[in-house]
Amino acid sequence: MANILIVEDEQNMQDIIAEYMHRGGHACHTAADGVDALLLLKNNPMDLMILDVMMPHLDGFSVCKLAREMSSLPIVMLTAKGDEDDKLKGYEYGADDYMTKPFSPKVLLAKVNALLRRFSVSPANSLSAGKITMLPAARKVFLDGTEITLTHKEYELLYFFMANPEQVFSREQLLNRIWGYDFEGNTRTVDTHVKTLRQKLGDEGRHVVTLIRSGYKFEVAK
C-alpha cells in the first residue's frame, strides 16, 4: 500500500481518482489547490503525487517545481492540454509521467503502480565516480561531499548511468528504461533531462558523454 496525494480541484474527478487508487489498495490524501497540496506534502510522508495542471492559487507546474525542492517522490501530471511543449515543461519541472484528460482511471492506476515498482527497487549500497557519490538506499546524491537535489527522473538517470558504466544507451533505450514503454513523449525529453543533470553536476557532468548518432554513456575515468 502506498500513500498517494491527489491534487485536483474538480471534486468529481478527485473522487473518481481516489476510488480507483483505493481499489488498487492505496491510501489517498486529497487537495483542491496547490497551496494545500504543498502543506500536505510538507507535513505527511507521501509515496506518489497525482497532480492536475489547471488549479486555483498555484498551478500544477509551480507545485511540481516546488515539490521537487521538498521530495523526490514520483509525480504524475494531469492536464486537458495535449500540447507537446506543455508536456516537456512538466518533465523539465520534475514530473515522471503525464496523462491528458479525458483518460482512463484504470490506465492511471497502472501507471501509478508501475512508478511505485520502479521507485521501490532495492538499489546498491553506494555508487561513486569522481566527486559524485550516490547512496541509493537513502536516495541521496553528494557532489564533493555536499548533497545536491535532483528531480526524480534526474536521479533515476544518474543511477542508471552509474550502475551501468561505460555502456552506450540510445535515447530510445533510456526512454524505455527510465520513462517506461508507454511513455507518450519523444527523445527530446531525454536530452532535456541530461542537460539539467549535467548542470547540477557541474564539472562532474563531464562523466555523462554524448555520442553522436548513438546516445549517451557514463565514463567513470573521464
Image (spheres, rainbow, N blue to C red):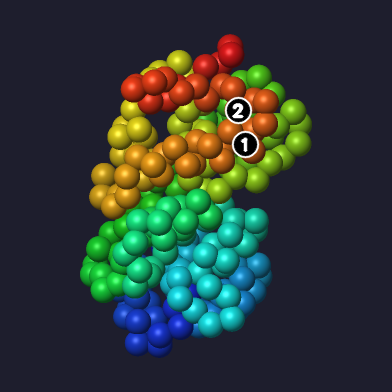
Between 71 and 209, the one nearer to me in the picture: 209
Q: Tell me the tag on residue 205.
A: 2
What amino acid is labelled 2 in the image?
Gly
- Residue 52 on image: x %, y %: 44, 72
Relative horizontal placement of residue 172, taking residue 44 as reference (left or right): left
Work out whether residue 74 can be spotted.
no
Q: In percent of the image, x 74 and y 28: which residue is there?
A: 144
Location of mark 1 (residue): 199
Q: Position of residue 161 (x, y in %)?
A: 47, 28
The residue at the point 58 percent across, 75 percent down is: 58
Alpha-carbon span between mark 2 and mark 1: 7 Å
- Mark 2: give few (<14), some (14-19) or many (20+) Cα within 10 Å: some
Which label belongs to residue 216? Answer: none
Residue 182 seen: yes
The amino acid type of the residue labelled 1 equals Gln
Residue lying at 65% horizontally and 56% vertically, measured from the top left: 69
Q: Are marks 2 and 1 in contact (CB under 8 Å)?
A: yes
- Neighbour tally class for label 1: few under 14, some 14-19, many 20 plus, Cα within 10 Å: few
Q: Vertically, is 111 above or below 193?
A: below
Residue pushed farthest top? Answer: 221
As drawn, 190 above or below 215: below
In this rendered view, identify the residue nearer to me: 147 or 64.
Answer: 64
- Whole-percent x, y for residue 18 in the image: 37, 77
Label 1, secondary structure: give it: helix
Q: In the displayed structure, does residue 142 sit left or right of residue 80? A: right
How far across and how far down the image is residue 217, in percent? 45, 22
Q: Residue at x 35, y 40 (%)?
A: 187
The secondary structure type at the circle numbered 2 is helix
